[in-house]
Image: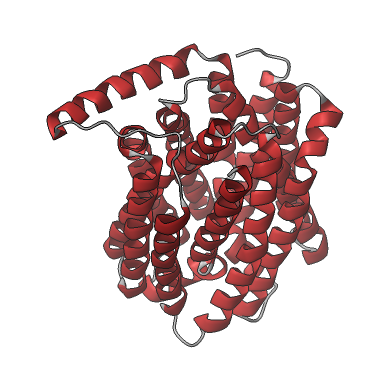
Amino acid sequence: MVQQAIRSYYLIVVLTTLGQTLHAATYVTFLIRQGGLSLFEINLVNVAFFSTVALMEVPTGVFADVFGRRASFLVSCVVTGAGLFIYGVSTSFWGFVSAEMIIALGVTFASGAFDAWIVDQLQHHGFEGTFEGVFSRGAVFGKMIGMAGAVVGASVFDLSMALPWFLGGAVYFIAGLVAWRIMREDYFTRKSASWRSHFQVMRETMMTGVAISRKSSIVRFVTILVVLRAFAVQAPNMQWQPFFGRFLTTQLGQGFIWVGIGIVTIFGAAFAPRFRRFFGDERNGLVMLQVVACVGIALVPVFVGSFGLAIGIYLAHEAVRGIFGPLCDSYLARGITSSAERATILSFQSLWGYAAGALGLVASGWAAAHWSLGAAWGLSGLTLVVAGAALWRRRA
């Protein structure tokens, strides 16, 4: 049963990542061409996404703990798929905002539930391996299919700018059907009660989960790191297409940059377990990775005159982020000892990251609009280098 659960996890990661990445290499270009948005307006569209996620993370995490992670994930696939279709037919700022909010709601139903599902399912069947190994391989498989998805989406973009969105929505619906068939919850016992009783249980679960989050030093520490990272990465996440687009002549070139990002993050994710064994101290190791990634963000604009150097530094920073993700997820999973509130705790931790991401979008968008893309990247990176250095050897 352990291997079956792991294989199911990998398959669902592959499908959802494919749905997410079909529009990844053309996202900003789509908003500029389809809706005529400026870079600042594009960031504001994403503020709607981050704000919605921050508001809904804990309630949907509680839903997963009470009604089951499988049910929550199925809702996520349907809602996210619908949001992608709506994105494809939207042509205005408010249309894009509406689509982002729908997708954000879908994301919250899966963000805490999916990781909580695989951890509890494996623990229920006596899993003796390491979670960073599972998360690391899942990240590798996801990045591999994500590279293909980005290239396919970029290839069909010139046929129809909406086609990558429609394909992504269809893939999410398929992912929901697959999850409905293969996601087992052998650890989960749903209580037979009225809706009023369920709401009472949800309230109690939320209060317990939040209380545990506030007391856990690991959850607090990871939350600080996630907040810092979420603020810092919004400039490169949202602006790499126009930043490197000046060197490219076709949209397919953006797809190949995404492939490069996928390759280096695969190597980073695959290296994560070895990094943990080599570095030893996980807390300081995570802080070091954070600082190095932020230095990379700040250095890219310095070499804007050389595409080779700029893209090389950018890909190096993405590789470091690839190491960070699985290590952070695994460290957090080991720090949560209460299975009943696991999805709630993960969602509570996650919401702070999305709130910080919304602030990062506003700050980097304003800096890009009033100064330059390079200034936005440099400000984000250097600010977080200072904050990350302050965490060195600090115990949360």
Question: Quick check: 169 above or below 123?
Answer: below
Towards the viewer: 250 or 52: 52
Identified at 60% across, 53% down, the residue is 7
Question: Quick check: 162 above or below 99?
Answer: below
42 displayed left or right of 245? left
Q: Which quadrant, please, contains the N terminus?
A: top right
Q: Which quadrant, please, contains the C terminus?
A: top right
47 displayed left or right of 250? left
Identified at 76% across, 37% down, the residue is 292
Towards the viewer: 275 or 395: 275
Image spot of residue 112 (x, y percent):
45, 38
181 displayed left or right of 291? left
Image spot of residue 75 (x, y percent):
32, 52
Residue 299 visible: no
Towards the viewer: 56 or 141: 141
Image spot of residue 353 (x, y percent):
49, 35
Towards the viewer: 154 or 91: 154
In the picture as drawn, the residue positioned furthest to the right comes out as: 278
Identified at 77% across, 63% down, the residue is 305
Q: How many marks?
A: 0
Image spot of residue 95 (x, y percent):
28, 64
Residue 154 visible: yes
Q: Which quadrant holds residue 97?
A: bottom left
Question: Quick check: 306 above or below 266?
Answer: below
The type of colouring in the image is secondary structure
